[in-house]
Image: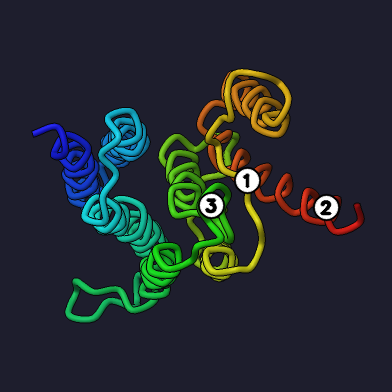
Amino acid sequence: MKKSIPNFITLINLFCGCCALVCAFNEMYVAVFWFLFAGGLADYADGFVARYLKVNSVLGKELDSLADMVSFGVVPGAILYMMISSHPVAEGYFYDEKLNLMALPAFLIPLFSALRLAKFNLDTRQSEDFIGLNTPSVTMFITGLMLIYEFDSFGMADMIYHPYFLYPIIIILSYLLVAELPMFSMKFKGMKWAGNERRIIFLILGFSMLFFLKEVAFTLMVCLYVLFSFFDKIFIAKS
């Protein structure tokens, strides 16, 4: 019974991902956010509980990737698909009035997410930190764009959902998912400053942005995370 607890939590993540997917296709973007938030908590909790109970298993690792593929692979692709489909530029590209051909590049995100998750399961180098941008961070970035579009934050909605703005974003995120760029994880090594400097500084900046910028902060935090990792790589390479 104890071994099944982390897997049950992982399935909560999958359930939330399925609900978020339905909400995305119905343009219920606030509900999408809350389901993804709950799924993200479950995704963090399953690993924590597994380590606490000392019941790590191969089944749990594979199940976690399958759940992540829905919540943090398919759902962000669906969000981008619906945002692009909503733009007036894309109105003339519907096939049979249901499938928008101009919005199909959005599903590059699920494709590269699947490739990233498969590589992660086989890559022994990623036991502590990441190589390439992880799928929850990509989802966080896209969720930020979704909320900016939903609430017209700082009057940016018209720009955010334009296909010619989102296409480069899709390409960049797809590349970062599989890039050989070291990215630090947010798993704290104890409660001391030493060894956790990047994580503590990043969290302070992140919460500050959330306080002042609200929904815009989600996208900016991922940009900051990539910059931290990029400059960290340069620093390490020179040292």
2 or 3: tag closer to the N-terminus: 3
Q: Callout 1: 10 Å neighbours few (<14), some, many (20+)?
A: many
Amino acid at pointer 2: Ile
Contact (Cβ within 8 Å) of mark 1 with mark 2: no
Q: Is residue 131 above or below residue 158?
A: below
* Label of residue 236 in the image: 2
Instruction: Note whether 160 is above or below 38 in the view shown.
Output: below
Secondary element type, mark 3: helix
State the residue at coordinates (80%, 50%). Answer: 231
Q: Any mark on residue 84, and which?
A: none
Distance of label 1 from label 3 (alpha carbons): 28 Å
Give the CA separation, mark 1 to mark 2.
13 Å
Taking the image as shown, residue 43 lies to the left or right of residue 95, namely right
Mark 2 to mark 3 CA distance (whole Å): 35 Å
Front tag of 1 and 3: 1
In the rendered image, is residue 109 in sight? no
**Which amino acid is tagged 3?**
Ile
Q: Quadrant of the N terminus?
A: top left
**Callout 1 secondary element:** loop
Residue behind mark 3: 160
The residue carrying pointer 3 sits among few (fewer than 14), some (14 to 19) or many (20 or more) residues within 10 Å by Cα, namely many
Side of 159 relative to 196 (left or right): left
In the figure, residue 56 lies in which quadrant? top left
**Which residue is labeled 1 in the image?**
184
Q: Amino acid at mark 1?
A: Phe
Residue 188: quarter of image: top right
Q: Position of residue 66 (x, y in %)?
A: 25, 58
Q: Is residue 216 visible?
A: yes
The structure residue drawn at horizontal position 59% and vertical position 22%, both measured from the top left corner, is 207
Q: Residues within 10 Å of mark 2 (few under 14, many from 20)?
A: few
Q: Residue at x 56, y 35 (%)?
A: 216
